[in-house]
Amino acid sequence: MRTESRRLFRNGLIRLLLVLAAIAVQCWWFVVLADMVRRYAPWVSVLYTYIPFLIILYIYGRETNSAFKMPWMILIAAVPLFGVVMYLILGHHNGTPGMRRKFLAVEEQYNGYLRQDRTVMRALEKRHMKLYRQAYYLLYRSGYPVYKDTAIRFYDDAARAYEAQLEAVRNAKRFIFIEYYAIEERGSFERLKRLLKEKTREGVEIRMIYDDLGSNFSLYPRHFDREMKAMGVQCRRFNPMMPVLDVFMGNRDHRKIMVVDGRIGFTGGYNLANEYFHRTSPYGWWKDSGVRLTGSAVRTLTVLFLEMWNSISETDHDIDRYVDLDPQETPEDGTLRTEALVQPYADTPLDTKRTGEEVYMNLIRAAERYIYISTPYLILTDEMTRELTSAAERGVDVRIAIPGTPDKRIVYAVTRAYCDDLVMKGVRVYEYLPGFNHAKQFACDDEMCTVGTVNMDFRSFYHHFEDGVLIFDRETTVRVRDDLAGMFAAGRMIDRESVERYRRITQIGHTLLRLGAPMM
């Protein structure tokens, strides 16, 4: 199975490299053409001098993180022509104006379906002001309501979450929505595919979105689309990889959402691929997690899927039949607890809200006793670093689990570069020794937690479409806390002594890695 997984990865990598090679040729031709123009029209050299300067001023004035600006400014100042070309391709993390208009118009159209029950917010304000402040940000800054009447189940293993998804699909009556960054065509997905084929025969409507970069099926992936269509599954690729210069190419759909009949919803860190369910083990034990929601909070996940579906190609002008369901319906299992509140949310690179990063920082700011964190990548903005170290300095127990076995060595090296500074300032960082830790989850003070798709890195915070669930519930938070505690116990803490021992040797390398981190 490992050989098969590596073969599929190799095929996808070949396709990606061919696309990147084609783009590199276009970049090279652009530079050569610019140099030819300069030779035949010397006055153009004046433009070559001032255009990079103006672009540096533009970058400096942008409403974005300073750590993101600095590497691009240095690169353009050092090698102007090359730096400008690279910035035009990779530096515009919020897409093109046309793409922003298209996506945001659909989002605005569907905002009316996300309505807040004011009694829920008033009750939360009276019950617990700290939790109210967390919910207030997501509601009034980003427009995501808080829901009661929702059963929550946390899965500390993606394989168990997948079994729950298969069971939900098996019982589907009306529709199934699936949106994943990566879908591996063979292996674990075959079980879901067989169920989907059965459900289409029963008349269940099925829609699927997958990211074209994350789901590299082979050199020619269109056969997957055709196969799904032949089964009766409506299928769309997000942002197809094309061998042409495209400033939107770096923005990927990193979300993981499944909605069944508008009443059951799943999300979490895992993709629909073999390693997440332990069918293959290229990096040791693959640790991931997810949540299932049953009840009113699934409305937000449904709207998020439909926003993405219609942003790719608008076909739905009325989505009432998917979101206006009978509120008297009860979950098939799980106990409704009126004190448990749930707030699903999403993040998009096409605005300046940075919702995923702000949710994390708000939890860190609110922590009074502890903040436990799991993330596969730890590539931080200056603001996030300040919040983590400030919490540790005021006596909060701040712990972070990172992978013990890297999936990308250069990214792991950057993660360690950030870890060392955190460790020196009192943050406890653990390497998860059994294998690769891919879970993205926070637990705070036995009061609130979040589980979702948002990594603690620049790509998740600035480039990708993401989603998560903020949960105000002691029982669920304790389960997430205990899962994190188990990861710390299975890990090795990075101690100050080892950091101090090698700090002088690694300092220059770590500085260079952190400088280039926002470009990764």
Image (cartoon, rainbow, N blue to C red):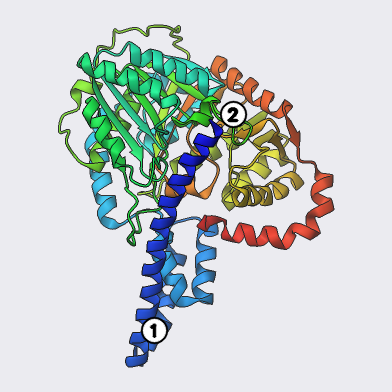
Quarter of the image where one finds residue 40: bottom left
Earlier along the polypeptide chain: callout 2 or callout 1? 1
Q: Is residue 149 visible?
A: no
Q: Can you tell which quarter of the image residue 482 is in?
A: top right
Report if residue 462 is visible in the image.
yes
> What amino acid type is highlighted by mark number 2?
Lys
Kindly identify which residue carries mark 1. Answer: 35
Residue 303 image position (x, y, % from top left): 29, 30
Which sits in the foreground, 437 or 128? 437
Location of residue 93 by image quarter: bottom left
Residue depicted at x 47% and y 22%: 291
Point 33% across, 42% down: residue = 221
Near mark 2 (Cα within 10 A), the count class, few <14, some 14-19 or many ≥20, is many
Residue under circle 2? 287
Q: Residue at x 40, y 77 (%)?
A: 31
The one nearer the camera, 53 or 245, is: 245
